[in-house]
Amino acid sequence: MRALPRRFYARPSRVVARALLGRLLVRGRGRRRLSGRIVEVEAYDGARDPASHAFRGETARNRTMFGPPGHAYIYVSYGVHHCLNVVTGTPGTAAAVLIRALEPVAGIAAMRRRRGLGDRERLARGPGCVTRALGLTVAHDGLDLTSGPLWIADGPPRRGGRRIARSPRIGISRAVARPWRFFLAGHPCVSGPRTAGRGVPTRRTGR
């Protein structure tokens, strides 16, 4: 497996969000590899999105969002949870996709030690759990996803026949009605509701 190229990320956040579902997020190489299949994401659209960290402009905290696509933007939420985002679009637009949940695939024993629990379905269920399972902190903010040590594999997405569903985003107070949360419907590792929001259409896909 190789890392996805930068052109994959140089697209609108909602396009990238859908395309990420079913792909492997990997930390490390060889036998020290940890990986999980992306099953839930949220799109954020920079200055056009009141829920985005970039809505009011560039700061020291969100600077990575304003750089080239294909980098990891990691921040601390509520002073407790680290959250992993993928920078998308073009430099200066500050669009990003939040990784909300993974289905653990490799390095599960290490994830269990980090999380202090054994239930595989709960290891990376939720943004804070994703970063704890993979051992990511703000020290990893700005990592280039096209060259490792954190990367998303270029293999075809595997969605197990599940459709891509969408709903409003979770845990925000602005632009709450925008249906920019995308997930694999019914997947047990999804952190929020596992069916589409009321009145929000879904999309059926293959593997």
Image (cartoon, helix red, strand yellow):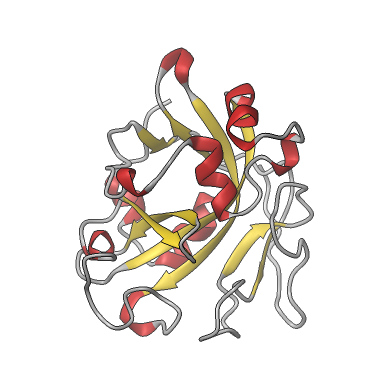
Residue 7 rendering spot, x and y as whole percentages: 29, 50
Coordinates of residue 171 in the picture (x, y in percent) = 60, 73
The answer to whether residue 189 is above or below residue 77 is: above
Q: Quadrant of residue 54?
A: bottom left
**Residue under the image location 37 percent in, 73 percent down:** 53
Choose between 25 and 9: the one closer to the eye.
25
The image shows residue 73 at horizontal and vertical percentages of: 34, 55
- Position of 44 with respect to 143 (left or right) is right
In the rendered image, which quarter contains the N terminus? top left
Residue 192: image quadrant is: bottom right
57 is higher (above) or lower (below) than 88: below
Q: Is residue 135 left or right of residue 48?
A: right
Give the residue displayed 38% in from the left and 67% down from the top: 12
Residue 59 picture location, percent across and down: 22, 71
Residue for point 34% across, 60% down: 88
Q: Is residue 26 left or right of residue 53?
A: right
* Outermost residue toward the top in this view: 31
**Residue plotted at (40% across, 45% down):** 137
Q: Is residue 31 left or right of residue 102?
A: left
Quadrant that contains the C terminus: top right
Task: Tell me if I can see residue 21 in this picture.
Answer: no
The answer to whether residue 17 shows anywhere in this view is yes
Out of 174 and 36, give the one closest to the viewer.
174
